[in-house]
Image: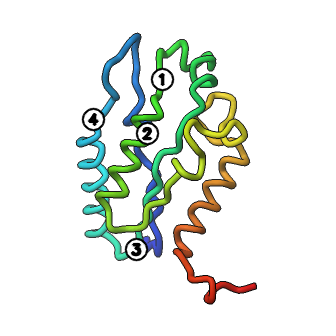
């Protein structure tokens, strides 16, 4: 059986920028290594399929919720929005494919209504914001005279 997707929507990197442990000075994966890994995924996918490709940046977190969430406290896991923004910026600068900017869609820090109780994973409103950002990115900019009323 052959699988030939028309689109690949790649939403990776959020765990790369996680920090685990007390006072950890670095992310799980460096920015350079994250970009190198994403490039390799793109290369492999390009060799296997002619699908159109879209990147999604990680979404910013709601820091207070992250700090208070029992699972993250127990696992000593945290995220810094500056790391998320840096990865999103690097993705936009690196790739020629469309990049859905969830930093802009969610705000920094993430708007309260867009993140669930853990402060990392999107709420239903956040999922809707992601889909809207994807659609806006795929539609691209249109001149006012090209828009429908």
What whole-number distance in Å separates the C-alpha atoms at marks 3 and 1? 35 Å
* Residue at which label 4 appears: 30
Is 127 on the left or on the right of 46, as rendered? Answer: right
Closer to the camera, 3 or 16?
16
What whole-number distance in Å separates the C-alpha atoms at marks 4 and 2? 12 Å
What whole-number distance in Å separates the C-alpha atoms at marks 4 and 3? 28 Å
* Residue at which label 3 appears: 51
Percent coordinates x, y for residue 141 in the rendering? 53, 75
Q: Using a 10 Å C-alpha cutoff, classify the residue at mark 3 as few (fewer than 14 neighbours), some (14 to 19) or many (20 or more).
A: some
Percent coordinates x, y for residue 129 in the rendering? 65, 54
Is 54 on the left or on the right of 38, as rendered? Answer: right
Q: Is residue 1 visible?
A: no
Percent coordinates x, y for residue 99 in the rendering? 44, 61
* Residue at which label 2 appears: 84
Secondary structure under the numbered disc 4 in the rendered image = loop
Dot 1 or dot 2: first in sequence order is 1
Q: Using a 10 Å C-alpha cutoff, classify the residue at mark 2 as few (fewer than 14 neighbours), some (14 to 19) or many (20 or more).
A: many
Residue at horizontal 69 percent and vertical 55 percent from the top: 128
Residue at horizontal 33 percent and vertical 29 percent from the top: 28
What whole-number distance in Å separates the C-alpha atoms at marks 1 and 2? 12 Å
Dot 4 or dot 3: first in sequence order is 4
- Residue 78: which numbered mark, if any? 1
Q: Residue furthest front?
A: 144
Q: Quadrant of residue 2?
A: bottom left
């Amino acid at each position: 059986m052959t699988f030939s997707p028309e689109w690949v929507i790649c939403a990776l990197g959020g765990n790369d920028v996680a920090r685990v442990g007390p006072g950890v000075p670095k992310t799980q994966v460096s920015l350079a290594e994250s970009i190198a890994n994403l490039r390799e995924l793109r290369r492999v996918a390009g060799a296997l399929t002619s699908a159109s490709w879209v990147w999604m940046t990680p979404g910013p977190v709601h820091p207070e919720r992250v700090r208070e969430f029992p699972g993250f406290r127990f696992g000593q896991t945290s995220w810094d929005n500056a790391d998320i923004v840096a990865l999103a910026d690097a993705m936009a600068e690196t790739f020629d494919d469309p990049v859905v900017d969830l930093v802009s869609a969610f705000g920094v820090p993430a708007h309260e209504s867009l993140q669930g109780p853990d402060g990392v994973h999107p709420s239903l409103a956040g999922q809707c914001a992601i889909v809207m950002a994807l659609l806006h990115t795929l539609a691209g900019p249109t001149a006012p005279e090209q828009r429908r009323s």
